[in-house]
Image (cartoon, helix red, strand yellow):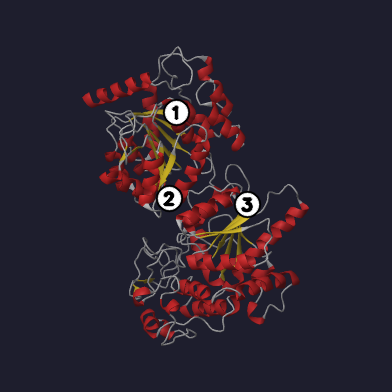
Amino acid sequence: MLGAVRRYGVAQALRASVPRSLHARSTPQLLKLQPSSVLKVSNAARPFHNFPQARSAASAAAQEDRPVRSESAQENAALHEFADLQKRGLVDPKIIETIARKMNITAMTDVQSQTFHKTLQGNDVLAQAKTGTGKTIAYLVPVLQSLMNSPRSPPSGRGTAEVRSMIISPTRELAEQIAVQARLLAAGTGLKVQTAVGGSGKQLGLNRIRGEGCDLLIGTPGRIEDILSDKRAGVRTSTLSSLVLDEADRLLDQGFAADLMRIIDLLPSPMKVDRQTLMFSATVPNEVMDMVRRAMKPKFDFVKTVRDDEAPTHLTVPQKAVMLNGLENGVPATLEIAKSYEDQMRNNHNLPPFKAIVYFNTTAEVNLVYEVASKMKMDRSTPVFVMHSRLTQRDRTRNAGTFRRQRSAILISSDVTARGMDFPDVTHVIQVGAPRDRDSYIHRLGRTARANKTGEGWILLNKGEIPAFNRLLGDLPIDGDKSLSTAAVDMTNGSADAPPAAQDIIGRVNNAMADVDYRTKSSAFMSLLSGASGGQSKQRFIDGLNRLAIHGYGLEEPPSVSPLIAQRTGLDRVRGVNIKAHVPYDNMVGGDRRMSRGGLGSRGGGFNRSGSRNRNESSDDLFGVGRFNRSGLRNSYERNDRFSGEKDTRFQPRSRDFKPSF
């Protein structure tokens, strides 16, 4: 009880000393609204076993904490336009002008209009909102306004910096994306925004923070924890006024709970410094509620903008599945999707420009296809970009930002962009090959049809991947599609029987592929070889890869494998494997650093054929060939292996087109 009294004593004193509005009011601060979608939640005695129960408890607490003061009509009025924030003296005109003129935004989204009343008062808020609904602006505006309301502390000395606000995100890309918007909103205010993310030089970042100052620090949990725990870094948080956890469910799902707890412990005690904590999350599982109890004040506001009956993206976006004649048909079919849509645009000027993200399961495939696309005579109005985990942070930030600003473009990507990244106006998500799991498919698809825009999803599958497709995604509204002529062409006979349009596309791909370095092709081949077989026999899997190498990549023979590796992986008993005693170094390591230490085990970054990360995640075998350990030996199946040899009849094909014929 004493702690609570001390805590709220500090909070009330600080809030009284710093006005929450730009204009004086007759009342100390805006009275808290309690619309049906906003719940006042108490942290005391709340047995949150699951979230529906948490909502019931929150509703009861809201009734107990009903305010007794009356509100003015102006303060009680709903917020719909950003101009309203300036008219009511809630937000500095510079910020509102930036939103209106540079971002071309006038109306608020649901999460913005429902949270601003709370966040601009300094309340702790847990907001449940889907990605792509404007939540970044929803927390940046109150954070920046709070910084403008609070005077800076005197400099603490050379080689040190005082961080006054902090935003934590689960990925480097998302942190950089947030920083871009934060710097734009802070333009002309004098506020300094800095980033601290993994993959960039720690010392270089510290030099910027200490040299330029840092009002708002945006970063990832690991790097921020590293900086705060390093006494020599010279970064202080003694006046930290706000903490934001963006994508809170992802932060915890990705194993950052311990880092977040350490960060909170390193921050000044809330009994000494009044700190506003904001959490934004697409879902609110028990783990998020545990973090709420740890980080937020005993009473916080819960804002839910996701309707219980709202259908998710993967149930509403048009989705099509295409069966490829072979792996070699994947790139031509992808280009045909783009060409077909551009033809539609000529006949329908109301269609938005073509803007697509094309997902491949391995970094090496991404590199190869990007090189092919770069060498083709692409339309200059539709530039091509690349994104994967092995790019430098500077390149990733530049490519993501440029693609985001383009009206029409193609981004060839690994799963690094599949969650949390917001790219406006993406019309198409194209997935080449079966994804790692159901969630991967859904999150990739979620990059389109955002913010009430339209979009569509495509998945291109080799015949051998159909059983896995049915098990993973057979209950989703995905329709079989036979409109792509390049998908059905038998490329082993030179495409002689293909329609002229298909021949043109395939010819352009082949010409560009001929100019790609052998090592790039070898790397892509070996990354696929070290993955999974799609539920088909090893023989059929190898036959398909060999066709890809010869008729897709234009190689005279498939890249070679050493006898030792072939023996350890059982490939020495498979017809067609190119086994040679003297294997080029690139093939020994897969060109993608996947076969080091003498095996097909995954030790590099990026993704294997199953789509799983090779550095920090186990390589789950989705399609039934077992898993490779670091020595290249196949691990035995576990009973809970989703795609073991046991027959799974949970999901049936939606179309006869996809009924396996083997």
Residue type pointed to by label 2: Thr
Which tag is nearer the camera, tag 2 or tag 1? 1
Question: Mark 1: which secondary structure?
Answer: helix
Q: Position of residue 306 (x, y in %)?
A: 50, 38
Q: Which residue is mark 2?
A: 171
Q: Position of residue 603 (x, y in %)?
A: 37, 68
**Vertical position of residue 297 compared to residue 398: above or below:** above
* Label 2, label 1: how far apart the Cα atoms are: 27 Å
Please identify the residue farthest to the bottom as the structure is shown.
581
Quarter of the image for residue 244 reads top left
Residue type pointed to by label 1: Met
Residue type pointed to by label 3: Thr
Q: Which residue is mark 1?
A: 148
Which tag is nearer the camera, tag 2 or tag 3? 2
Q: Position of residue 598 (x, y in %)?
A: 35, 77
* Label 1, label 3: how far apart the Cα atoms are: 38 Å
Q: Residue at x 41, y 69 (%)?
A: 646
User: In this view of the protein, can residue 416 be seen by the observer?
Assistant: yes
**Vertical position of residue 8 compared to residue 440: above or below:** above
